[in-house]
Amino acid sequence: MPFSFTVTYTEGQARRGVLTTPHGVVQTPCFMPVGTRGAVKGITHRDVEDVGAEIILGNTYHLHLRPGDDLIARAGGLHAFTGWHKPILTDSGGYQVFSLADRAKVTEEGVTFRSHLDGALCALSPEKATDIQSQLGSDIAMVLDQLIGAGVRDPRSAMERSARWARRARARLLQLREDPKSAPEVIVTNPGQAQFGIIQGGTDLALRTESVQATADAGFESYAIGGLSVGEPVDVMYEVVGHTAPQLPEHSPRYLMGTGMPDDLIECVARGVDMFDCVLPTRNARNGQLLTWAGVLVIKNAQYAEDRQPPDPGCGCYTCRTFSRAYLRHLFMAGEMTAATLLTVHNLYFYLDLMHRIRDAIGFGSFGKLRQEFHQTFSRR
Amino acid sequence: MPFSFTVTYTEGQARRGVLTTPHGVVQTPCFMPVGTRGAVKGITHRDVEDVGAEIILGNTYHLHLRPGDDLIARAGGLHAFTGWHKPILTDSGGYQVFSLADRAKVTEEGVTFRSHLDGALCALSPEKATDIQSQLGSDIAMVLDQLIGAGVRDPRSAMERSARWARRARARLLQLREDPKSAPEVIVTNPGQAQFGIIQGGTDLALRTESVQATADAGFESYAIGGLSVGEPVDVMYEVVGHTAPQLPEHSPRYLMGTGMPDDLIECVARGVDMFDCVLPTRNARNGQLLTWAGVLVIKNAQYAEDRQPPDPGCGCYTCRTFSRAYLRHLFMAGEMTAATLLTVHNLYFYLDLMHRIRDAIGFGSFGKLRQEFHQTFSRR
C-alpha cells in the first residue's frame, strides 16, 4: 500500500482521517506509543495491540547504537526484526543525540557525538539519519533537524539550518528511492517509506510561518511540528500549534512531536493536529502514576491500601477489569515489575480510548461537547 | 467444591489424576508457577492462564509481611485480593523465615525472627502459620515444619519436631474449621481449604519411613515431601523420592516441594509424584536462561545476535510463535523488562506443556517412551 491520507470528517479545525502506510491503516487523530528500542517499555506487542495501538514509534538513536541498523537491515528491517507488523514511525535521532549522547558537536555538515553506551565516536547528518531510517524500514521517517539551544542559540539560525538539512534529507531519500544502486551501502528495507519534514521556529509565530514555507518547498509526504513541549507554558504551546497547523498542507497528516498530557491532545486536535506521540503514559506508569478520566492517580498513596475499586471505574482495560487499586499498590510497593506492566496497559488504553472517542466525536459532530466535558472532569493535579 | 483427588490412569508408579479444590480442578501431574507476593514474577495473570497454569503458589512469609494477611483477609482472601480466581497453594513461610529473615530463633514453641523489610519482630508457630493461611484463604495450606540445619542439626530431632508441629497445625485447622467462633481473631476466607503435612527425614530412608507414619497419623488431606532439592546430589534426591512417595496414601496427591529441572519432573513423576513447584523457570527467565526441549539456552550469548530462529522451534508459546532469538537477545542486552516477560512466558509454557505431555502419555501408556525420548534430547548443559 502506498502512503496516503484522507480527511473523512472535520469539525472546526479538528480533522478525522485515515492514514494508509505500507504496513497498514491508521485512524487519525492517533496516538503513537513510544517503543524506544523496538519494544514499548513494560508490555508485549500483544498488549500493545490489545490496548488499540495502530502505530508505534521507534527511536533511531537507540536502535542505531544497539543492536545497530545494519543488523536490523540484515534481518529484513524493524518489522521483521521486532515482530511488530503494523505501522512504525521513526524519529531522526537528533533529539537523543543532544539529550543523551556525550560531547555532541554540531556544524553545518551534521553532528558528531559519543555513544552514551560505550563512548564510541559517532556522526549523524541529514543524509546519515535518512540512511539509518531507510535500513530500519519504518513506514514514516523523520528528517534530522537543528534544535534550538543545541549548539545554536538563535531560533532563526536553527530554523534556517533545519530547512537546509531538510532539503538534504529529502534529496537523499529520493536518491535511495529512485536509484538505490547508487548507495550500495544502504539496504532499503521498506521502499514505500514516507518522509516527514519538521517545522521549527520556537515560539516566534513569524518564524514558524517561514519554516512552513521553507520546509514545504522540499516536497515531503507530510510535516511535523517540532520544538514544542520543551518547557514552554502550555498556553504558548497551544498558540504556536494553533498558528502553525492550519498552514500545513490540508491533505497531509499533521504530527505534533512529543506531546503530551491528555488535555493537550484534545486541545491540539482542536487546532488541527492528526498525530501524537509521547513517553508520558508509559513512563508515568513505571513511576506509579495512572492517568484516568478524573486525572492523575498516584498508586503508592496510602489512601489506596485497602481501596477495592478499579483504578478508573470508567475504563474497560484489562487492568481496570481485573484488579483493584489495593492490589496494584501492593505490587508497586513490593517492586513487582508486573505493577509497571499493568499500569502501562491502563495508561496506554486510556490514551488510545481517548483518541477513539475523539475520532467518533468528530465523525458525529460532537467534538466540541467532548472537549468541554473532558475539561470538566479531568484534573492535572 | 470440596477437596478431592482421583487417580485416573497409572503406568508403573506414575499417576495421572484430577485434583478438585474450592476454586476449580487441576489435572495432575501438575506444575505450580511460584507467585511469591501474589503475582507470578514478570507476567500478568492473563499470561499465566495462557501458558496453561491451573494452580499457582503464594508465599506466606512474604504476604504476611506485606501487605499483611489481615489486609488480604479484609479484602476477602488471596483470590479476591489478587484477582487470580483459580486454585492457590500457600507454603507455611518456614523456608523463607530461615533463608530471608534476620536472627531467626527456633524453639519447640515456634520461631521468632525479624522482618527482612523493616526489622520488625515477628513470630511463627504451627498455629500462627495455620491462622495466616486461613486468612489468605488458599485452597491448599502447608504445615510449618522444622528444617534440618535451621537451629536443629540432627535429622531425627528435626523430623520428630516436624511431626509434633504437624499435629499442632492440624488441631488448629480443625478448630478453625469446626468452631471458627473460638478464634475470632482469624478471618477464615476459604472454609474448604485443605491442609497438607510435610514428610521430613533428610536423606535417611528409615527416618523418611518414620516421618510418613508420624505425619499421616495426624490425618491431613494430603502430604508433601520436603527437605529435598537443598543441595543433595540428584541421584540421592531421586532415591529418597522413590522410597517415600509410594508409602504415601494412594488416594491423595503427592507434592514434591521446590523441584526442579525439567528432567527432575519426569523422573519424580516416574517415582509417583503428582504436584511440583519451583522458581527455576521464572527466575532463570529473568536471568536470560531459556529452557527448551534441547536443554538450556543462554540468550545473551553472542551466537544468537543474528539468529532468526524462535527460541525453541518445537514450542507453541507466544514468544516462540512471534520472536527470534536475535530480538530477544537485543531486548535482554538493552535491559528491557519485556525480555524477562517473554522469557518467563516461554519457560512456564515449556514446563506446563511438558506436564501436559506427561499426563497424555500416562493416559496412553506411553510415559516410559516419553521419559526415554526426553532424556535423549534434553541436556542440562
Image (cartoon, coloured by chain):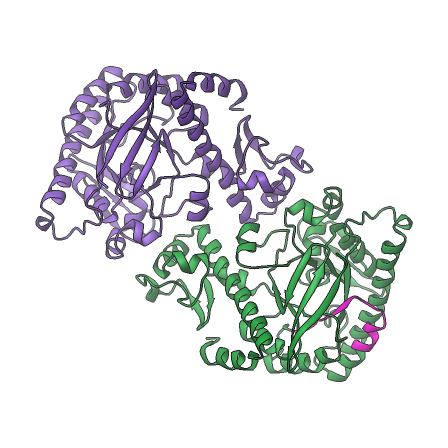
Chain colours: A green, B purple
Q: Is residue B353 above or below residue B75?
A: above
Residue B266 relative to residue A281: left or right: left
Residue B121 relative to residue A340: left or right: left
Q: Residue at x 35, y 33 (%)?
A: B27
Magenta segment range?
A: A212-228
Q: Can the viewer see residue B114 in this picture? A: yes
Give the image location of residue B82, x and y in percent: 34, 52
Is residue B69 magenta-colored?
Answer: no
Given residues A48 and A118, the one toward you in this image is A48
Q: Can the viewer see residue A44 in this picture? A: no
Residue B256 relative to residue B379: left or right: left
Give the image location of residue B278, x and y in percent: 39, 34
Give the image location of residue B194, x and y in percent: 22, 38
Q: Residue at x 57, y 47 (%)?
A: B335
Residue A215 relative to residue B338: left or right: right
Q: How many marks?
A: 0
Is residue A220 magenta-colored?
Answer: yes
Given residues A8 and A225, the one toward you in this image is A8
Q: Residue at x 60, y 45 (%)?
A: B331
Q: Residue at x 69, y 51 (%)?
A: A63
